[in-house]
Amino acid sequence: MEYVLFVLYFSFFLCLCALVCLYFSGCQEMTYKHEEACCGDIFWI
């Protein structure tokens, strides 16, 4: 059970990092599309 929680937290952390990188890169218009793709791809792996 601890492994599952670790994976979920790690995936969420990666998703936040990706959004922050996109935001500071000036891709604010693409943030929503990347957010959906990021979180969706991670949880479907």
Image (cartoon, rainbow, N blue to C red):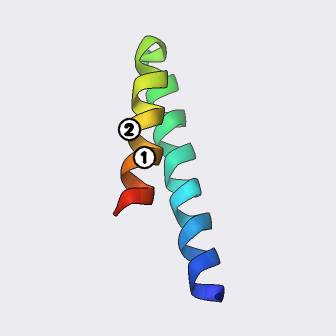
Which of these two is toward me, 12 or 41? 41
Question: Splitting the image into 4 quarters, where does residue 20 fall?
Answer: top right
Residue lying at 58% horizontally and 55% vertically, measured from the top left: 12
Side of 8 where 28 appears, left or right: left
Q: Which residue is mark 2?
A: 37
Horizontal and vertical percent position of residue 34: 40, 31
The type of residue carrying mark 2 is Ala
* Mark number, residue 31: none
Q: Does residue 25 lie above or below 12 as drawn? A: above
Instruction: Tell me the kind of residue under disc 1.
Output: Gly
In the drawing, what numbered circle is on residue 40?
1
Residue 7, percent across and down?
53, 73
Q: In x, y percent, where is residue 9?
A: 62, 65
Residue drawn at x 34%, y 63% is 45
Q: Is residue 3 above or below residue 45?
A: below
Q: Residues within 10 Å of mark 2 (few under 14, many from 20)?
A: few
Q: Quadrant of residue 30?
A: top left
